[in-house]
């Protein structure tokens, strides 16, 4: 939306809603931008921001403050109200804008609408937000967009925001691709930015466990009928690549190129992608569990027990393959 080089001259006010606004308007954008938030259960608009072109002490666009007739509060996992800035919690909505309920669906009414002891009634939005220092709400993501991988709690939208801040990126989305080790992050983006540039930027601003194992550049991010990111379609696009056909079985004397092909097949099986010669294991989705699997498969294929430390001393594919080739030559497999 903000990527248009020259917005129409007639554009004076731009209002948004329906999905998360992931980037703020650029400096010099000619029209006032007002971001709105609200579910159908609260008459569609619950909060509204001021003009997003004003300076702010936060990077993500806010959804503002509640409109007249709306009440909002954030609660933690135990139902306690959150009032301080920075801490995330589920957004509950109350006030006269609240719907009566779902027609002929009492089980869903009991699940979604909370009745407090003081007689107040609140809608559990399922949306995670946080207060800013200015007393405005920032939308973090859906409760179901928060994932846990290898003991880390991760907000997918926070990664998407980091990708969108990379120069040359137009759209971005992140999904979790299931694998034998519990899943891995896959990032998708459109635009002119090269994969190495995107990965380099992300490595500089995100902790390692939040950097996607795989980055895929697409012509455009697929959307569903409601105009929102189609994550099932993204996962279909990210299906692991097949290993090269005709890789040797590793038995008997092996030429250097045959060993390399077999090692490539092993990396492909574990990492879900065919490695390039200069790919670093830990930068394309590798971690300790996958390292153990690679070493186990390598031992099974060639009969050579490599120490675990080799994954750290030789994490680049061509270096690791050379280590395997040297051990194969010495052993005479």
Image (cartoon, grey):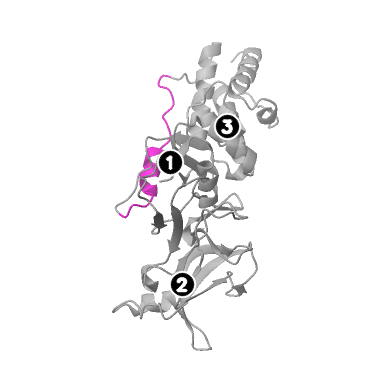
User: Is 146 in front, or is 87?
Assistant: 87
Q: Is residue 99 left or right of residue 284?
A: left
Region rendered in magenta = 226-246
Picture layout, residue 88 above or below residue 26 = below
Determine which of the numbered discs, if any, sits on residue 3 in the image: 1
User: Is 313 in front, or is 259?
Assistant: 313
Determine which of the numbered discs, if any, sits on residue 294 in the image: 3
Query: Which residue does the numbered mark 2 point to in the structure image?
Result: 67
The outermost residue toward the front is 9
Picture layout, residue 111 above or below residue 233 = below
- Majority secondary structure in the magenta region: loop
Element under label 3?
helix
Going 59% across and 49% down the picture, which residue do you hit? 150
Specify the quadrant that holds the C terminus: top right
Going 60% across and 67% down the picture, which residue do you hit? 135
Q: Residue 283 at x, y = what percent?
A: 59, 33
Q: Residue 149 at x, y = what percent?
A: 56, 50
Comes first in the chain, label 1 or label 3 = 1
């Amino acid at each position: 939306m903000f990527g248009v080089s020259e917005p129409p001259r007639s554009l004076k006010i731009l209002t948004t809603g329906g999905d998360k606004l992931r980037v703020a308007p650029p400096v010099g954008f000619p029209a006032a931008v007002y971001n709105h938030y609200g579910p159908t259960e609260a008459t569609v608009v619950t909060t509204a921001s001021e003009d997003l072109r004003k300076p702010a002490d936060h990077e993500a666009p806010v959804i503002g403050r509640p409109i007249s007739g709306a009440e909002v509060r954030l609660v933690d996992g135990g139902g306690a109200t959150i009032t301080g800035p920075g801490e995330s919690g589920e957004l509950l909505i109350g006030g006269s804008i609240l719907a009566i309920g779902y027609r002929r669906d009492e089980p869903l009414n009991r699940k979604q609408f909370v009745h407090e002891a003081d007689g107040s009634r609140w809608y559990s939005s399922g949306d995670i937000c946080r207060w800013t220092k200015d007393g405005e709400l920032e939308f973090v993501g859906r409760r179901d967009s928060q994932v846990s991988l290898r003991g880390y709690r991760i907000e997918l939208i926070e990664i998407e925001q980091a990708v969108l801040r990379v120069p040359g990126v137009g759209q971005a989305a992140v999904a979790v691709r299931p694998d034998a080790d519990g899943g891995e992050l896959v990032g998708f983006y459109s635009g002119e930015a090269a994969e190495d540039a995107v990965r380099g930027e992300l490595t500089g601003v995100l902790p390692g466990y939040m950097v996607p194992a795989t980055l895929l550049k697409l012509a455009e991010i697929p959307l569903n009928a409601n105009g929102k990111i189609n994550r099932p379609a993204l996962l279909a696009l990210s299906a692991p690549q097949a290993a090269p056909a005709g890789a040797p079985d590793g038995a008997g004397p092996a030429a250097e190129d045959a060993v390399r092909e077999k090692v490539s097949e092993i990396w492909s099986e574990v990492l879900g992608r065919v490695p390039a010669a200069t790919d670093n294991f830990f930068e394309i989705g590798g971690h300790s569990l996958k390292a153990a699997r690679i070493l186990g498969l390598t031992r099974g294929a060639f009969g050579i027990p490599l120490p675990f430390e080799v994954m750290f001393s030789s994490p680049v594919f061509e270096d690791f393959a050379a280590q395997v080739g040297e051990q194969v030559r010495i052993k005479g497999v």
